[in-house]
């Protein structure tokens, strides 16, 4: 029996993409076959790849999947663990002897597990461009000695792109190949992927999406196509939704490729989806983290997945293991969360009778919270966040610095923090969009105060 109403979802994708003012998007849905039946796979595309050229989006067009790449890098790390090359608890310095971080103790003690779970405390937004050569990751890791330590090792959770570039270097040292070559050999080729690449010159043989900083009637193209090669393991895979679903299938089946080849042990596949660490705030991505995947509680049903953002491109991947369903969405605009919530909510309701949790939003009735303890400056290497009071209201001023700020030509932004609960506030980044982001204040057991916003933990520097 056919489960996926292909005509309906093709129409809904087109309707919602148009409604949300997104230049182009690509959708993929996978439903595993049961009792020997074949899998159902549906893909659709709508809009354009590039607002300047008007090139139509197609199902075989490739899109930057951004940080969804992290789960792919994590999968290869787990394959190497299956091979006995190292363990989750192996100190990284035993694998990469040249490792030198700003904190000597972290240099000696940080493990593979800390990197996979974003709990190393290494500044997560180091986007140093170390060139296009095959030694770019080696150079990147050498430069990490200048990266700040944002929180004590293992003390909390903070999203860490840098840790995944370091995981990519672990893959290189262990296999003797570049990260790009190792990914092809251990994942892309065994999975039979035909439109998945890591380098721009490989992606450009296909119709490929261009990022947009803004959609709508007057779209604004991204100033560059992609990020530096040095952050490849954290977010440079380019693929179609079809190929992303083939990767998702590997995890829905406990480590098996479509032809039955075991690429990942059942134990490793289970560990990647299992609880590893708690997230300080649970309203943005997931309530907890596995090894690569984040974990979502959908009203009692456990989903796993990852999101991706590059410069003007967005990607979403969700797996509902108990139903054998995976959904992939790629869009060429800087933020597509409203589209994701509406479309995925409808798809998973129709296919698995699961209800999405309510979106994070401001309370219907105003809440009074004493914000005085939270006032001050919070700072990490690439971001300064000032919390202050003005005329009885709370505000957050965010100023970016470094390579990403230069690429995006970003200016400091000021947003009101709307009280939701003690230590929890809502921020609306775009006044024209009805979506809010959580801003949580918390304290480590050792007394250090932190602000958690945008999945990053930022330490308090001054009151």
Image (cartoon, rainbow, N blue to C red):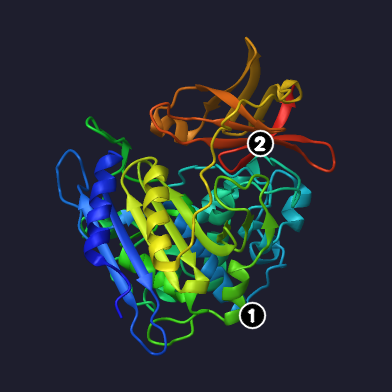
Question: Residue at 39% of width from left, 52% of height from top?
Answer: 315
Image location of residue 291, percent across then percent down: 60, 64
Upstream in the sequence, badge 2 or badge 1? Answer: 1
Q: Is residue 72 visible?
A: no
| SS for callout 2 | strand
In the image, farthest residue toward the right: 446
Check residue 440 in the rendering and tell me which mark sits there, or answer none. Answer: 2
Give the CA separation, mark 2 to mark 1. Answer: 40 Å
Q: Residues within 10 Å of mark 1 (few under 14, many from 20)?
A: few
In the image, farthest residue toward the bottom: 36
Image location of residue 320, percent across then percent down: 49, 67
| SS for callout 1 | loop
Question: Residue at 38% of width from left, 56% of height from top?
Answer: 346
Image location of residue 333, percent across then percent down: 33, 42
Q: Residues within 10 Å of mark 2 (few under 14, many from 20)?
A: many
In the image: residue 27, left or right of residue 93: left
Image location of residue 444, percent across then percent down: 79, 41
Q: Residue 365 is drawn in which quadrant?
A: top right
- Judged by depth in the image, the label closer to the viewer, 2 or 1, is 2
Q: Which residue is mark 1?
A: 84
34 shown above or below 371: below
Quarter containing the N terminus: bottom left
Q: Is residue 127 visible?
A: yes
In the image: residue 357, left or right of residue 31: right
Question: Residue at 54% of width from left, 25% of height from top?
Answer: 399
């Amino acid at each position: 029996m056919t489960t996926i109403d292909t005509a309906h979802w093709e129409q809904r994708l087109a309707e919602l993409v148009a409604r949300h003012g997104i230049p182009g998007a690509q959708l993929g849905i996978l439903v595993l076959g049961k009792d020997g039946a074949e899998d159902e796979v549906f893909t659709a595309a709508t809009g354009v790849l590039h607002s300047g050229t008007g090139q139509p989006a197609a199902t075989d067009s490739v899109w930057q999947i951004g940080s969804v790449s992290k789960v792919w890098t994590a999968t290869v790390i787990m394959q190497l663990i299956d091979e006995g090359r190292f363990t989750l608890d192996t100190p990284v310095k035993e694998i990469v002897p040249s490792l030198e971080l700003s904190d000597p103790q972290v240099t000696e003690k940080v493990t593979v597990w800390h990197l996979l779970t974003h709990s190393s405390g290494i500044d997560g937004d180091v986007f140093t461009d170390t060139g296009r050569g095959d030694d770019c990751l080696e150079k990147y890791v050498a430069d990490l000695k200048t990266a700040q330590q944002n929180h004590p090792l293992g003390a909390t959770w903070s999203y860490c792109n840098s840790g995944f570039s370091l995981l990519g270097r672990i893959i290189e040292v262990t296999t003797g190949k570049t990260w790009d070559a190792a990914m092809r050999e251990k994942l892309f080729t065994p999975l039979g992927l035909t439109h998945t690449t890591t380098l721009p010159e490989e992606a450009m043989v296909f119709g490929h999406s261009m990022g947009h900083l803004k959609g709508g009637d007057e779209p604004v193209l991204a100033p560059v196509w992609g990020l530096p090669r040095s952050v490849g393991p954290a977010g440079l895979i380019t693929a179609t939704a079809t190929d992303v679903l083939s990767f998702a299938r590997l995890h829905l089946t406990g480590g098996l490729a479509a032809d039955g080849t075991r690429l990942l042990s059942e134990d490793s596949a289970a560990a990647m989806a299992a609880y590893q660490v708690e997230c300080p705030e649970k309203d943005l991505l997931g309530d907890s983290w596995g090894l690569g995947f984040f974990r979502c509680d959908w009203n009692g049903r456990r989903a796993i997945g990852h999101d991706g953002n590059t410069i003007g491109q967005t990607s979403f991947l969700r797996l509902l293991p108990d139903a054998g369903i995976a959904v992939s969405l790629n869009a060429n605009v800087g933020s597509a969360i409203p589209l994701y919530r509406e479309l995925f909510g409808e798809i998973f309701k129709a296919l698995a009778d699961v209800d999405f949790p309510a979106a994070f939003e401001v309370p219907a009735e105003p809440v009074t919270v004493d914000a005085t303890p939270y006032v001050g400056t919070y700072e990490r290497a690439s971001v300064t966040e000032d919390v202050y009071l003005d005329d009885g209201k709370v505000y957050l001023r965010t100023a970016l610095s470094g390579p990403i700020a230069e690429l995006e030509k970003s200016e400091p932004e000021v947003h009101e923090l709307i009280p939701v609960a003690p230590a929890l506030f809502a921020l609306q980044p775009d006044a024209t969009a009805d979506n809010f982001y959580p801003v949580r204040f918390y304290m480590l057991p050792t007394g250090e105060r932190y602000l958690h916003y945008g999945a990053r933990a930022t330490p308090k520097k001054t009151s």
